[in-house]
Image (spheres, helix red, strand yellow):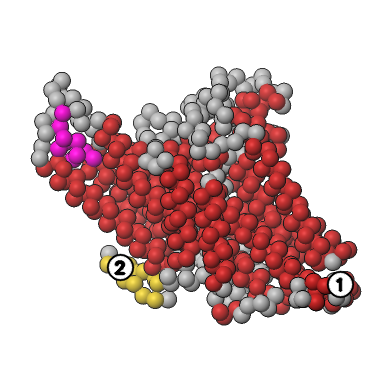
């Protein structure tokens, strides 16, 4: 029983740490992208500061697009991971670099 | 061989009708019953779990209800076909009817494999009945726990308590403790924490952004994570049924263990789970999308993203968990993470209770089905025994389905206000159904005094029916 509990805790904290990085990290990226979009659009996209409508900024849209591209890449990586697993490949991570080998 | 089984073999050997002459043996009929029951389970697995991937997207209107179930079904289908390397050792997590390679235990192969087939039929029947019952109640519960529970119940009856793998050895997470109980305790908490942290930070970052911008951006992003969750479900869950059907084929010597999964089994399971997903368990989608937390697009995306991350990381680490528990934990987390948002704790409590009793109750149904099949089998022949179990299953499913028609929930009323007494698919009416099936169910999970919002909407009318309106004091 103690062994099982220990093993479960051992997995759980890893899932929690990486889960926060990825699971909370991606929404945070999207939040920054949305913020950049609003900043770029100006006007009513941002809540009024001192009653003055915000100015538009040309860089906003570019930054937002770049962040959205990263988010799309992460989702695609997730899909690739699921597909590789289904097809019987094993993905291991040495450091940060994924290594794919056949079972 | 005991006298009883000798007697059964004699019955088996007697050619009884013309069908027998053209090759339709009782054994083949039994096998067909197993396959059909397994596919029926696969179907319930599909509609029970649509909510895990799509409840939040439907709630935030990132996708229309029909688009959501269509996308989810398509990706489940793709996912099911993607699983090339399917293990047929699926039962080994909790029971001992196969060896490490997947070969069925020899003692279960007497009488043409009837003992093993009966364990499978009864276990599947227990899982299906539990899945339909929790759907009627609008409660998300884990289909894999239901399957494990049903199989544990029928195995205990067949092999005794020693036929069950209660706990893994040493540090290897296995058995009911390692593969069911501990993950069920840990995974919702982890998902809840991840989603709560994400939600809190997302709202802090976007404090000054107008709501319209926030909603549009997160709605678009959510389609991606919903797709990820659907695909992942397809690769995982269809496998279980494929494994069970192939085990039955091996046990009746219609298939060779080393040849993997027959292609027709893969096709049948893939299409069945996709069909189930497409039908959509609207009652469960409504509870998860509307009942637990009122979900905004940023919360919806954060919930999905947390679920996907927790599921994928756990699968990488070999930590078995239930998608249902993770998805529910994430939704709860987004409610806790957003300032001012409220969680309907009575609904969450009801879900928690459903999770606790999933394994024991589906086990009990599995055990009862086994007893029925066994005794009818001894008295009237194996095939009749299996038919008896199937008949009970069909009657129970039919009764519950008829019951559900009284307050149908579908894409037409999925967005109705949770607290509104006027809506057709009202949660309160789901509560009525629950109260009639298990009379005191509404008393268990209703800490009305602790809840942040008025939470007795589900239990309130139920309590009236039971003549117990005094304490509910609902304002609906």
Residue B163 vs residue B330: left or right?
Answer: right
Between residue B272 and residue B228, name the one nearer to us: B272
Residue B67: percent from left, percent from top: 42, 45
**Residue B438: image x %, image y %?**
70, 38
* B402 left or right of A80 in image: right
* Residue that appears at 68% across and 42% down: B400
Give the letter of the chain under mark 2: A
Looking at the rendering, which quadrant does residue B470 occupy? Answer: top right
Task: Specify whether residue A57 is painted magenta.
Answer: no
Q: What residue did someone put label 1 on? A: B16
* Span shown in magenta: A34-43
> In this view of the protein, which residue sits in the foreground, B24 or B423?
B24
Q: Give the letter of the chain under mark 1.
A: B
Q: Is there one chain holding both mark 2 and mark 1?
A: no
Q: Is residue A34 above or below residue A89?
A: above
Neighbour tally class for label 2: few under 14, some 14-19, many 20 plus, Cα within 10 Å: few
Quarter the C terminus of chain B occupies = top right
> How many residues crowd mark 1 within 10 Å: few (<14), some (14–19), many (20+)?
few
Image coords of residue A33 (percent x, y) = 22, 43
At 58% from the left and 54% from the top, the residue drawn is B43
Which secondary structure lies at badge 2? strand
Kindly identify which residue carries mark 2: A98
Q: Is residue B99 above or below residue B182?
A: below
- Give SS at disc 1: loop
Can residue B211 be seen in the rendering of this structure? yes
Above or below residue B31? Residue A74 is: above
């Amino acid at each position: 029983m103690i062994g099982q509990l220990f093993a479960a805790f051992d997995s759980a904290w890893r899932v929690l740490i990486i889960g926060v990085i990825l699971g909370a990290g991606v929404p945070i990226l999207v939040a920054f992208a949305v913020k950049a979009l609003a900043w770029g659009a100006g006007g009513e996209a941002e809540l009024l500061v001192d009653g003055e409508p915000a100015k538009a900024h040309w860089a906003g849209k570019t930054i937002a697009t770049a962040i959205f591209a990263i988010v799309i890449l992460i989702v695609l990586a997730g899909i690739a991971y699921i597909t590789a697993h289904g097809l019987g490949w094993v993905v291991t991570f040495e450091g940060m670099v994924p290594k794919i080998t056949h079972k | 061989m005991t006298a009883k089984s000798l007697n059964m073999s004699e019955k088996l050997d007697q050619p009884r009708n013309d069908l027998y002459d053209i090759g339709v043996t009782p054994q083949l009929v039994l096998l067909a019953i197993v396959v059909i029951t397994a596919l029926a389970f696969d179907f319930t697995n599909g509609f029970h779990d649509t909510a895990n991937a799509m409840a939040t997207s439907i709630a935030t209107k990132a996708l229309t209800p029909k688009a959501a179930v269509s996308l989810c079904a398509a990706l489940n289908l793709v996912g099911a076909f993607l699983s090339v390397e399917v293990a047929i050792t699926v039962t080994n997590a909790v029971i001992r009817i196969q060896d490490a390679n997947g070969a069925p235990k020899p003692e279960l192969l007497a009488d043409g494999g009837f003992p093993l087939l009966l364990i499978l039929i009864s276990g599947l029947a227990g899982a299906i009945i539990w899945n339909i019952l929790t759907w009627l109640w609008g409660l998300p519960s884990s289909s894999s726990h239901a399957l494990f529970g049903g199989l544990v119940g029928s195995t205990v009856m067949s092999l005794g308590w020693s036929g069950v793998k209660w706990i893994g050895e040493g540090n290897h997470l296995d058995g009911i403790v390692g593969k069911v109980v501990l993950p069920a305790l840990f995974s919702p908490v982890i998902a809840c924490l991840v989603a709560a942290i994400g939600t809190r930070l997302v709202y802090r970052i976007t404090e000054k952004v107008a709501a319209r911008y926030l909603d549009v951006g997160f709605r678009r992003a959510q389609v991606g994570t919903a797709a990820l969750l659907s695909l992942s479900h397809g690769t995982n869950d269809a496998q279980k049924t494929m494994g069970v059907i192939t085990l039955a084929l091996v046990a009746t010597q219609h298939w060779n263990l080393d040849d993997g999964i027959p292609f027709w089994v893969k096709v049948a399971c893939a299409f069945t789970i996709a069909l189930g997903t497409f039908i959509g368990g609207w009652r469960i989608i409504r509870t998860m999308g509307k009942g637990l937390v009122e979900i905004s697009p940023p919360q919806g995306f954060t919930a999905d993203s947390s679920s996907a991350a927790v599921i994928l990381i756990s699968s990488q680490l070999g930590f078995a968990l239930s998608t249902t528990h993770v998805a529910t934990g994430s939704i709860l987390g987004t409610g806790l993470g957003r300032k001012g948002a409220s969680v309907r704790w009575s609904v969450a409590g009801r879900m928690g209770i459903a999770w606790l009793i999933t394994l024991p109750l589906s086990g009990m149904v599995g055990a009862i089905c086994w007893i029925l099949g066994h005794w009818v089998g001894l008295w009237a022949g194996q095939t009749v025994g299996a038919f008896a179990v199937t008949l009970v299953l069909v009657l129970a499913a039919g009764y519950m389905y008829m019951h559900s028609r009284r307050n149908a929930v579908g894409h037409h009323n999925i967005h109705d206000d949770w607290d509104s007494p006027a809506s057709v698919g009202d949660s309160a009416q789901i509560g009525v159904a629950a109260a009639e099936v298990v009379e005191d169910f509404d008393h268990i999970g209703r800490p009305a005094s602790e809840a942040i919002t008025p939470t007795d909407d589900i239990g309130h009318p139920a309590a009236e029916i039971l003549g117990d309106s005094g304490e509910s004091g609902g304002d609906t």
